[in-house]
């Protein structure tokens, strides 16, 4: 699947920035591909790039309109269809990471046939996956895990890749969700993979590699989230992680979309090690990544210092303070491998 940039990022009328995390993630990590955004009335997210109409985007050379919004169940709201049809009629390709296949909607399918534009359903892969085998494979892997969904697992893995490559380390980000696939150009959305093949899909995403090579595997969901724990467990087993980084948002009291309380970081560490030992008995926690966006600078630094003292591993906010300490720990592990 080749998705042609540059992009128009469609945010619809999402209620908050988390519901626009696909679009915002693409803008953050591939800004050179993003010409503008299209927002409907009532949209509560802003990617801080120019607001463009479909006609303006086409005139500026946009090739693809990317539906940059997410929601529970990955459904395509009916009132977004008109915008997608208009984009297709203007000659733009349309790409989405939702569970709803674009061509399953007659108006969209007919518009694509009229214009010859392409429809990209990034969540669905043509790749056939085997069941996971759990056999030890060479190379090193770090998985980001979470106390909840939408806490920074993708951003942490991308930040680790950037810092490791800047040091000359052999490292690759491995995408396991639709936004990551948009950013990296490779991977698979494992929440759209049949349950029996999730761990096998991750073995394909992060295959055998040179002994010193690091794969930074994007985590999904949380082992404690009642909606997504099954995906998280299959991902953990397939990643066969040597190291994992716990990602956390400290101001939440319940998990996103449900009434369950957040687990503690200690509970996540213990559960990840207990379950991860099935495919890598040496799995270890090497750091904590905290989204401190809602905290003041002094409060954020105090929280991170407390976590380091409590857990004995480096803690940081990758966006605010960088990931130098997290990579130091991974680099020391790689040197011993």
Image (spheres, rainbow, N blue to C red):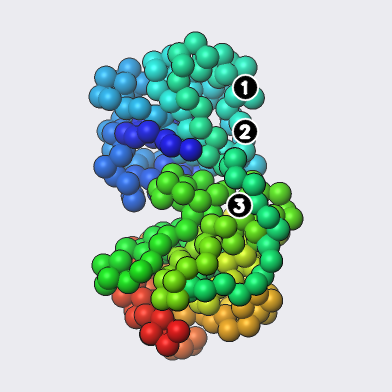
| Residue 163 visible (yes or no) | no
**Labelled pair 2, 1 in contact (Cβ < 8 Å):** yes
Query: Residue at 57% of width from left, 80% of height from top?
Result: 283
Relative to 263, does residue 232 appear above or below in the rendering? above
Secondary structure under tag 3 reads helix
Along the viewing direction, whichever of 37 and 110 lies nearer the viewer: 110
Query: Residue at 31% of width from left, 75% of height from top?
Result: 324
Q: Earlier in the sequence, mark 3 or mark 1?
A: 1
Q: Position of residue 212 (x, y in %)?
A: 41, 76
Q: Which residue in the structure is indicated by mark 3?
A: 190
Q: Earlier in the sequence, mark 3 or mark 2?
A: 2
Q: Which residue in the structure is indicated by mark 2?
A: 100
Secondary structure under tag 1 reads loop
Instruction: Give the CA separation, mark 3 to mark 2.
Output: 15 Å
**Horizontal arrangement in the rendering, residue 296 relative to residue 178 (left or right):** left
Q: Residues within 10 Å of mark 2 (few under 14, many from 20)?
A: some
Instruction: Determine which quarter of the picture holds residue 10.
Output: top left
Q: Which residue in the structure is indicated by mark 1?
A: 105
Q: Position of residue 209 (x, y in %)?
A: 47, 68
Q: Position of residue 87 (x, y in %)?
A: 42, 20
Query: Residue at 36% of width from left, 21% of height from top?
Result: 54
């Amino acid at each position: 699947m080749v998705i042609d940039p540059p992009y128009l990022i469609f945010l619809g009328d999402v209620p908050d920035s988390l519901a626009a995390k696909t679009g915002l993630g693409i803008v953050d990590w591939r800004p050179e591909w993003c010409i503008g955004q299209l927002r409907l009335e009532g949209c509560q997210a802003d990617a801080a790039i120019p607001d463009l109409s479909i006609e303006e985007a086409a005139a500026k050379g946009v090739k693809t309109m990317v539906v940059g919004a997410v929601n529970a169940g990955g459904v395509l709201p009916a009132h977004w269809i008109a915008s997608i049809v208009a984009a297709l009629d203007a000659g733009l390709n349309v790409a989405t990471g939702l569970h709803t296949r674009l061509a399953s909607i007659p108006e969209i399918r007919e518009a694509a046939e009229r214009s010859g534009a392409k429809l990209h359903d990034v969540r669905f892969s043509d790749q056939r996956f085997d069941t996971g085998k759990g056999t030890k494979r060479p190379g090193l892997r770090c998985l980001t895990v979470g106390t909840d969904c939408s806490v920074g697992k993708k951003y942490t893995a991308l930040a680790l890749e950037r810092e490791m490559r800047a040091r000359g380390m052999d490292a690759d980000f491995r995408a396991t969700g639709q936004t990551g696939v948009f950013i990296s150009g490779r991977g698979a959305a494992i929440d759209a993979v049949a349950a029996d093949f999730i761990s096998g899909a991750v073995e394909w995403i992060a295959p055998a590699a040179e002994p010193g090579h690091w794969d930074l595997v994007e985590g999904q969901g949380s082992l404690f989230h009642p909606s997504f724990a099954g995906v998280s467990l299959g991902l953990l087993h397939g990643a066969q992680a040597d190291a994992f980084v716990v990602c956390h948002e400290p101001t939440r009291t319940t998990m996103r979309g449900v009434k369950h309380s957040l687990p503690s970081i200690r509970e996540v560490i213990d559960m990840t090690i207990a379950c991860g030992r099935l495919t890598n008995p040496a799995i270890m926690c090497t750091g904590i990544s905290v989204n401190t966006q809602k905290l003041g600078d002094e409060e954020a630094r105090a929280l991170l210092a407390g976590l380091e003292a409590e857990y004995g591993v480096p803690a940081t906010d990758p966006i605010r303070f960088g990931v130098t300490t997290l990579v130091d720990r991974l680099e020391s592990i790689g040197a011993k491998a």
